[in-house]
Image: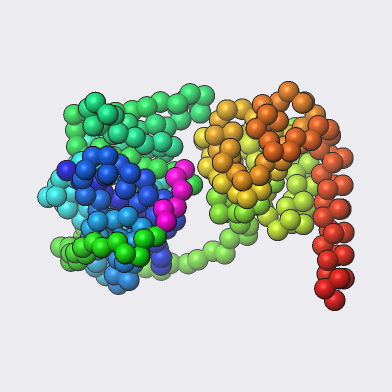
Amino acid sequence: MGVWVISEYRETLQRVSMELIGKARELSDELNEELTAVVLGWKISDCADFLIQHGADHVIFIEHELLQHYTAGGYTKVLSKLINERKPSIVLIGATHIGRDLAPRLAARLKTGLTADCTHLEIDPNTKNLLMTRPAFSGNLMATIECPVHRPQMATVRPGVFPMPCANPSRKGTVESIEPDLSDEDLLVIVEKVMKIEKSSIDISEAKIVVSGGRGVGSKKGFDILHELAEALGGTVAGSRGAVEAGWIEKEKQVGQTGKIIKPKLYIACGISGAIQHIAGMHESEYIIAINKDPEAPIMSIADLAVVGDLHKIVPQLTKLIREHKLSCKALIA
């Protein structure tokens, strides 16, 4: 019994882990079971109160010098041993680069199933099994998967799918620290040095303002005007699946069921028709502006402001007006 969230810690707790805590709290309450956050690393005990205040009943710290940096061998060994001993019913992991590497290895070691890249989780009211929903067939349909026989029920969940839970400073919980039996031989790979690469752009899942382009942009060169608009607004550029497949923008910038789920304050869709897979990735944006030649495009029906016209004429004009407005504001302040 019990719901576990494997909370990813890289210098700090990753946002997706906190999003999972919020959703896992709902699942735990429905099952009337305890919610446990499991954190692996070295000298990480400073985040216990934070996890409890956001919904965890119990926090387990697995601390060892060899866990300071992620290695598949080390993490899989200590987690599989602990899960076999404690036998939780549900284990949730963020679908980050680490989570996508760890989860299938862990599921294989535990001889259970894994549903990857979930976008929805709920408890079946009759069986009390976890229902895990994820896109299938390149995002053309949604599949709901159940693991009725084996335990634990495991799922990885995409960042940005669930909201961050609110903190409750009065919440109380318990904390447990475990020092695992781990040696160099268990790691398979030894991390000798970690080199950080500065990101050249904002992660679209964290951006407050996103200017997104689709096939209607016409070419990779056409994205230049979107970059100019994003720069003027202080945002970042993203794209639809069609734009990514055409090679006009990087895969990590893709919005949608097969890309990233985002919730910016402002989303400007340029030349995007609005297939259901794309809308699923951005429909919770606070304010949506759609620019499209086709007034009947699906994206126009969900937009707060729908502009019918040629984006190649409208976007440069919009950028010019924003820049002029910013200059006039600076002049007034001076």
How many numbered markers are drawn?
0
Q: Where is residue 46 in the image (x, y as percent from the top left)?
A: 32, 71
Question: Would residue 267 appear left or right of 165 to someone viewing this image?
Answer: right
Who is closer to the viewer here, 178 or 251? 178
- The answer to whether residue 20 shows anywhere in this view is yes
Q: Where is residue 76 in the image (x, y as percent from the top left)?
A: 25, 51
Quadrant, the N terminus: top left
Q: Where is residue 106 in the image (x, y as percent from the top left)?
A: 26, 45
Residue drawn at 24 percent across, 61 percent down:
173
Who is closer to the viewer here, 244 or 305? 305
- The answer to whether residue 189 shows anywhere in this view is no
Question: Would residue 10 appear left or right of 220 to someone viewing this image?
Answer: left
Residue 318 belongs to magenta span: no
Query: Splitting the image into 4 quarters, where does residue 293 fall?
Result: top right
Q: Position of residue 201 (x, y in %)?
A: 63, 57
Who is closer to the viewer here, 66 or 121? 121
Residue drawn at 48 percent across, 23 percent down:
141
Who is closer to the viewer here, 172 or 222? 172
126 is higher (above) or lower (below) than 60: above
Residue drawn at 18 percent across, 29 percent down:
149
281 is higher (above) or lower (below) than 136: below
Looking at the image, the residue that sits furthest to the left is 85
170 is higher (above) or lower (below) than 144: below
Query: Splitting the image into 4 quarters, where does residue 197 fall?
Result: bottom right
Quadrant, the C terminus: bottom right
In the image, which residues are magenta? Answer: 161-166
Question: Would residue 300 appear left or right of 144 to someone viewing this image?
Answer: right
59 is higher (above) or lower (below) than 153: below
Residue drawn at 48 percent across, 67 percent down:
195
Residue 165 belongs to magenta span: yes
Query: Splitting the image into 4 quarters, where does residue 251 fall?
Result: top right
